Amino acid sequence: MRRPVAIRLSAAVGTLALAAATTAVLSAPEASAAAGGATGYATQNGGTTGGAGGQTVRATTGTAIHQALCNRASSSTPIVIQVEGTINHGNTSQVSGGSCSTAADKIELKKISNVTIVGVGSGAVFDQLGIHIRESSNIIIQNVTVRNVKKSGSPLSNGGDAIGMESDVRNVWVDHATLEASGGEAEGYDGLFDMKDNTQYVTLSYSVLRNSGRGGLIGSSESDVSNGYVTFHHNLYENLDSRAPLLRGGIAHIYNNHYVHLNESGINSRAGAKARVDNNYFEDSKDVLGTFYTDAAGSWQVSGNIFDNVTWSERGEDNNPAGPNPQSNTSVSIPYSYSLDDAACVPGIVSRTAGANKGLKVSDGSCSAQSPDPTDPTPDPTDPTPDPTDPTGPSGTNLSLGAGADGSSKASGTSYGNVRDGDLSTYWSPAGSTGSISVKWGSATTVSKVAIKEAAGSAGAIGSWKVVNGDTGATLTSGSGAGVITFPATSQKKVTFTITSASGTPKVAEFETYAG
């Protein structure tokens, strides 16, 4: 078992060392433009610096944003626009000028370059009014919330996308944004983050996309394949029906993102697209990777991902899910440097960093698969740890066999009762390679250790896992490999062992629980 290493998060003013995943993240000073610099594909093609070096202007209305753009000496004069307050249809008017092309129903960055829009102070909220980039380059959008933007034809309409890029767009970095809707297409909402008609060299980082039918796309149709070179990292995709993202042609690098409740499909690689998918955490979702709703196939390279309670549909003519055991079917070379956090760390890191008003904190990419024991905040990396495959188990009473104990499972295959019968010849298996098995009691029971014993012939099948407090949903610890698992003593009515990756089909013969 790997020795735990602390998660470390970098803020705008330096590095924050966290002793454990549950340690509070310190606040950072007021957001400043482009703290830390662009990442991913936005660093290519000359880089993305936005309005660095230009005048800084404060704006509290959409009209003031337009005025700042139009008052520049030229359409390429660098400018940083600091935004505070709520921007909506009521305070956004068209402004004319030689250095701008604006509209009354949206924030439109059209035929311009070298612009940063950054939320400051109490925050910037674009309410029912999106940000659209057309025929522009070198744009940064940072620390903003865009919500409830309706499609064309809606009462408050501006084309549908929360942030949309179209027509020869180059070098855009969107960072620490919150993009959200209040429903799907039937309720009038479209994509949260769309790229069309020759949009290239884009990065979306440390952002939240949630509560929408459509997360976003690269390419508006199977013939719109001139887009690409897009990086998605350290984002939260939550409660989306599909398009997380949808890729048509081009190349995307997708790493260290947390996906929760993708209801229909997730990363949809189509029409010759290539996706490199590294160290992401997929949770409680369906068909998180593959080619869906078309026979125009795309491809993917996968490594280090965790699939936690992910279900997969059957293959068909227009449906090619990558699971239940995703394998690479292409190779994607990445031209820039980057650091990967282990997938098991991703939910904790993303929850502390992603979205607007999080202080522009980022990960330094050094998190290992586990957090340190909170009672030992500075572990010695040379200190040996117990062998996780130790078959003897802890001493004391196995609470799984006691009166009042029961069990339950998700993605169940064989009977969950087999893990608490004291018989190593019987076992529980999930229907695929991942799933959850629980032990529960009629009243709160203190547990600080569990022992996971694999059935004969399946030793080593269990890969990564987490132990969860079934009462609260909190992760007590995580790691890899079967054996004895220790965590802080916790009083709970149910404890759950969730297998998030495995080689083949895992078989749990016994799920023992102990008070100490």
Image (spheres, helix red, strand yellow):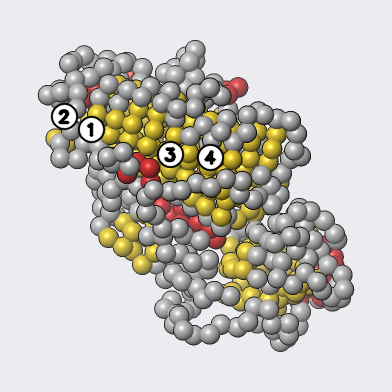
- Mark 4 or mark 3: whose residue is earlier in sequence: 3
Q: Secondary structure at mark 4?
A: strand
Write the residue at 33% across / 42% down. 44
Residue 114 is marked as 1
The residue type indicated by label 4 comes to: Lys
For disc 4, the marked residue is 274
Q: Secondary structure at mark 3?
A: strand
Q: CA distance from mark 1 to mark 4?
A: 29 Å
Q: Determine whether label 4 and label 3 are within 8 Å by CB.
A: no
The residue type indicated by label 1 comes to: Asn
- Mark 1 or mark 3: whose residue is earlier in sequence: 1
Q: Residues within 10 Å of mark 4 (few under 14, many from 20)?
A: many
Q: CA distance from mark 4 to mark 2?
A: 36 Å
Judged by depth in the image, the label closer to the viewer, 1 or 4, is 4
- Mark 1 or mark 2: whose residue is earlier in sequence: 2
- Mark 1 or mark 4: whose residue is earlier in sequence: 1
Q: Secondary structure at mark 2?
A: loop
For disc 2, the marked residue is 77
Residue 252 lies, with reference to residue 16, above or below; the image says: above
For disc 3, the marked residue is 230
Q: CA distance from mark 4 to mark 3?
A: 11 Å
Give the side of residue 124 with respect to residue 510, left or right.
left
Give the side of residue 42 with respect to residue 406, left or right.
left
The residue type indicated by label 2 comes to: Thr
Q: Determine whether label 4 and label 2 are within 8 Å by CB.
A: no
Q: Residues within 10 Å of mark 2 (few under 14, many from 20)?
A: some
Q: CA distance from mark 1 to mark 3?
A: 19 Å
